[in-house]
Image (cartoon, rainbow, N blue to C red):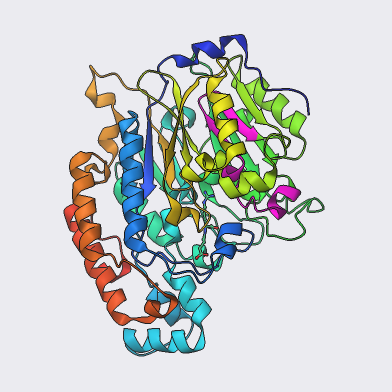
């Protein structure tokens, strides 16, 4: 590996105001949040299978996380949960009768299918869609391509509702295009923004942004693929997403995940890399053809490109996977510097914490602060801070001309602020169970409660009907 850890001379200028405002949309944790061991190749999901979950604590951790990130000056928004259990999926699988009978029969005969229908996996909104802002798209509109998540059955049920939610939140068709998920063929596995990073030169708004797509397998050339765990993202899907986003392909870089990394539990690229503006923090063994990838990024991102490699000597891949150092959020704060928002697992791991400190103390990059957040309930299913949020870069706007402010295109009910935080906390306290066991998932009262809770929430947020039960 050639050394790419020292940033270009212009890196110090990265403290300039970002060229585009970025909104972070966190997925609200659902009230059936549980540990069913559903995600093959995701170590935390496998290791915590069967554990009793704490949906209320999980949802409150998510709200506290949003508060902490909003306090850094980041535009914070959120997406409502999906309806669970997905009773319609049970019916598609041949279960009949009223809802209580469907649930009881599924619990008795196909408990794994019931668990899939109860997952709160939509909360990891980094997998909801891939996004490109208006300034990067040929038609000057912001594009969102819903991810098909076809590799994991419990996640493949998310896209229709994700599409309905995103269409309601980004309802302004002049500004936003919400695309349906790609067709779910073997060639088209798409896991959304978890495998996509938009890099740009914060010192030069004229320089086009670079879209970095990472895939697990090229189905036309499949010899280099993992041996143990599934590769979820295909090159073919990444290319189709880039097309739908209306990007100039000259500004896209496609890189393959290292198959050994997938086999060690790197089921998404955001487990080993995080980028912001022209900074890219990543593990040395993240990708095949490391040097080619770095050359391509250096050429496109421009002089301010600031790659920050972490070597395997500093942190093994297994440590990266268990601590989720790279699943931190890297955000530009109001003073123009960057903050690394890490899961508390990093703080409690001496070597991972040392890496975070080393990066923070190195004056050659823009990262001036590290903060630690407790998202333990999500982490136990393999979802760190970065998994919990979908980044939506917005067009640059001038405060003096509010008509150019694309925030106006976002559904106001989904914009997070202190009032909304209080409202969401009260809503969670009212509806969410403290604990959930696998048996609880078959309780018809849980389904009814979930529907009542979602109905109450969508009314509070003034959202249109987005769930199947709302007809
Ligand atoms: O798809 N876990 C999710 C975690 C997603 C993390 N997202 C990002 N890396 N962006 C997954 O593997 C576990 C559910 C369970 O086992 O009950 C789960 O789906």
Residue 272 located within the stretch drawn in magenta: yes
On the rendered image, what quadrant is the C terminus found in? bottom left
Q: Where is residue 431 shown, x and y percent of the image?
A: 24, 65
State which quadrant residue 285 falls in: top right
State which quadrant residue 410 falls in: top left
Q: Report the residue at 48% width, 69% height from top.
A: 51
On the rendered image, what quadrant is the N terminus found in? top right
Q: Where is residue 432 shown, x and y percent of the image?
A: 28, 64
Q: Where is residue 216 shown, x and y percent of the image?
A: 68, 49
Q: Report the residue at 31% width, 32% height from top.
A: 71
Tell me if residue 306 can be seen. yes
Residue 452 located within the stretch drawn in magenta: no
Asked if residue 424 is positioned above or below residue 51 in the image, the reply reads above
Q: Is residue 317 left or right of residue 343?
A: right
Label count reads 0
Tell me if residue 471 can be seen. no
Asked if residue 15 is positioned above or below residue 253 in the image, the reply reads above
Q: Is residue 227 left or right of residue 166?
A: right
Q: Which residues are magenta?
A: 260-282
Q: Is residue 15 left or right of residue 278?
A: left
Q: Report the residue at 35% width, 22% height from top.
A: 334
Q: Report the residue at 27% width, 45% height from top.
A: 414
- Front residue of 314/100: it is 314
Asked if residue 21 is positioned above or below residue 78 in the image, the reply reads above
Q: Where is residue 459 shown, x and y percent of the image?
A: 17, 57
- Front residue of 342/129: it is 342
């Amino acid at each position: 590996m050639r050394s790419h850890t020292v940033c270009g001379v212009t890196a110090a200028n990265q403290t300039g105001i970002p060229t585009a405002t970025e909104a972070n949309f966190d997925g609200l944790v659902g009230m059936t949040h549980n540990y069913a061991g559903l995600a093959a190749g995701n170590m935390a999901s496998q290791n915590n299978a069967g554990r009793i979950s704490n949906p209320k604590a999980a949802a409150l951790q998510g709200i506290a996380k949003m508060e902490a990130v909003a306090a850094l000056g980041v535009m914070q928004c959120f997406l409502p949960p999906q309806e669970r259990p997905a009773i319609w999926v049970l019916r598609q699988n041949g279960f009949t009768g009223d809802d209580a009978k469907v649930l009881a029969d599924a619990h008795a005969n196909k408990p794994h299918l019931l668990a899939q229908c109860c997952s709160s996996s939509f909360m990891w909104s980094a997998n909801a869609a891939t996004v490109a802002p208006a300034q990067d798209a040929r038609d000057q509109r912001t594009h969102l391509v819903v991810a098909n998540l076809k590799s994991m059955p419990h996640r493949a049920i998310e896209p229709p509702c994700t599409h309905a939610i995103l269409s309601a939140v980004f309802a302004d068709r002049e500004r936003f295009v919400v695309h349906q998920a790609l067709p779910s063929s073997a060639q088209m596995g798409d896991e959304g923004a978890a495998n996509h990073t938009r890099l740009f030169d914060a010192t030069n708004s004229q320089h086009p942004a670079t879209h970095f797509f990472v895939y697990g397998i090229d189905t036309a050339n499949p010899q280099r693929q993992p041996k143990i765990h599934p590769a979820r993202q295909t090159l073919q899907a990444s290319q189709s997403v880039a097309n739908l986003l209306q990007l100039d392909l000259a500004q896209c870089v496609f890189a393959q995940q290292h198959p050994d990394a997938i086999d060690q539990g790197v089921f998404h690229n955001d487990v080993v890399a995080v980028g912001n503006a022209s900074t890219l923090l990543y593990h040395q063994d993240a990708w095949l053809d490391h040097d080619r990838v770095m050359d391509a990024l250096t050429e496109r991102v421009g002089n301010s490109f600031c790659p920050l490699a972490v070597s395997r000597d500093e942190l093994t891949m297994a440590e990266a996977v268990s601590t989720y150092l790279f699943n931190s959020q890297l955000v530009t704060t109001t003073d123009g510097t960057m903050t690394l928002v890490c899961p508390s697992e990093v703080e409690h791991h001496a070597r991972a914490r040392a890496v975070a400190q080393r990066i923070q103390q190195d004056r050659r990059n823009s990262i001036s602060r590290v903060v630690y957040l407790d998202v333990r309930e999500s982490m136990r299913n393999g979802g760190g801070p970065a998994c919990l949020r979908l980044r939506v870069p917005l067009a640059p706007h001038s405060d003096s001309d509010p008509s150019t402010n694309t925030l106006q295109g976002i559904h106001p009910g989904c914009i997070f602020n202190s009032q909304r935080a209080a409202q969401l906390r009260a809503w969670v306290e009212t509806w969410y169970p403290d604990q959930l066991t696998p048996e609880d998932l078959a309780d018809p009262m849980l389904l009814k409660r979930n529907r009542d809770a979602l109905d109450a929430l969508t009314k509070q947020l003034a959202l249109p009907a987005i769930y199947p039960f709302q007809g």
